[in-house]
Amino acid sequence: MNKIALFEHPLRSTPLVECAGQYCDNRIWIKRDDLIPFCFGGNKARKAAEFYHVLKETDTDLLMTYGSNCSNHCRVIANLAFALGVHCHIISPDSKEEDSFNRLMTEQFGATVETCPVSEVSDTIDRAMASFTEKGRKPYFIMGGGHGIPGCNAYVKAYEEILLQQLEYGVDFDLICHASGTGSTQAGLTCGRLMHAHSGKKCPQVVGISIAREAKRGREVIRESIAEYLGERYEELYRDADLIFTDKYRLGGYGNYNEEVAQLIGKVMSHEGIPMDTTYVGKAFCGMLKYLREKRISGKNILFIHTGGTPLYFDHLKGLS
Ligand SMILES: *Cc1c(COP(=O)(O)O)cnc(C)c1O
């Protein structure tokens, strides 16, 4: 397996920028995880850096994962596999949409994409894993969205980065908000908070804005990840009130196009020069503003984590969705 020089060293902190535009009665800061210097960045690139260290210890010769046509995760894993010098095989539910830029790049990295009806994704994964193993390959399976301990660990580190940046930038954040999907980003940030809450440091609360799942299932998956990550310390550190995950701003569900979100994305691009996509980041930014308004939160310092998805911004510009 090839080494990836970039991931041999800890990633540098991603910048924080304070918004110039007026969006609500709070000061909004954006943490630019979209600028992580690998394959257009984003939270999947941050997670990939952690998977890299796990994979290096294995004799894997094939990465397998799954995701939709517009999956950022598949793009990043395909690039990771290419850089490692191993094959990448992706299972993806059938889609009527035109190929997204993420899909085109996934294929450009040499990944094979096997599509199937959405109800057969799980069986297709099992079948493909068994078939590769039978042929003497050593496939390594990464859950959708980079879910699992390495993915969670990536955002424990990000939380610790934020604690240091509060000192560096001279600002204490009251809340950290972000788009929550498969839940490992939120699980990691929440674990980071729980592990440091008694250290005397100012530890901002984390608010996940669901872009897909309903609250019940979303919370359950995040709670399980937190339990898995904290292990023996779970009972001592975790209380249900520590997990804030709202499904009120899904605006028609995963991937659904929303005009209000599209307008806000235009405003953010004009005022900040920061691209946001309609499926994750733009939708969550819109949801965060609604959340702050509904909770009558004002005069606070809010940190929004930009979790990436830059290629999706261009899909939207071209009118794909
Ligand atoms: C995957 C993704 C998310 C959601 O992250 P999870 O860890 O799956 O909750 C948010 N934003 C972008 C741009 C993503 O690609």
Image: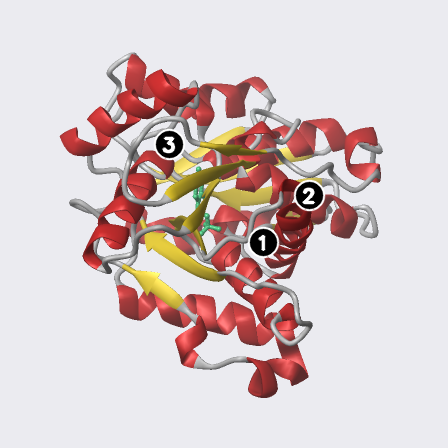
Residue at image point 64% right, 51% down: 154
| Residue 228 appears anywhere in the view | yes
User: Secondary structure beneath disc 1?
Assistant: helix
Is disc 1's CB within 8 Å of ligand 1?
no
Residue at image point 60% right, 25% down: 39
Q: Is residue 100 left or right of residue 42?
A: left
Amino acid beneath label 3: Asn
- Nearest to N terminus: mark 1 or mark 2: 1
Name of the residue lying farthest toward the top: 318
The span from disc 3 to disc 1 (Cα, nearest Å) is: 24 Å
Amino acid beneath label 1: Ala
Question: Foreground residue, 228 or 201?
Answer: 201
Residue 69, labelled with which disc?
3
Residue 315 image position (x, y, % from top left): 34, 19
Q: Which residue is mark 2?
A: 168
Binning the other alpha carbons within 10 Å of mark 3 as few (below 14), some (14 to 19) or many (20 upward) gives: many
Q: Quadrant of residue 26?
A: top left
Residue at image point 25% right, 29% down: 264
Number of the front mark, 1 or 2: 2
How many labels, in total? 3
- Nearest to N terminus: mark 3 or mark 1: 3
Quadrant housing the C terminus: top left
Question: Foreground residue, 63 or 153?
Answer: 153
Residue 13 image position (x, y, % from top left): 68, 39
Ligand 1 in which quarter: top left
Amino acid beneath label 2: Glu
User: Secondary structure beneath disc 2?
Assistant: helix
Name of the residue lying farthest toward the bottom: 235
User: Secondary structure beneath disc 3?
Assistant: loop
Q: Are marks 1 and 2 in contact (CB under 8 Å)?
A: no
Residue 224 image position (x, y, % from top left): 49, 73
Q: Which residue is mark 1?
A: 130
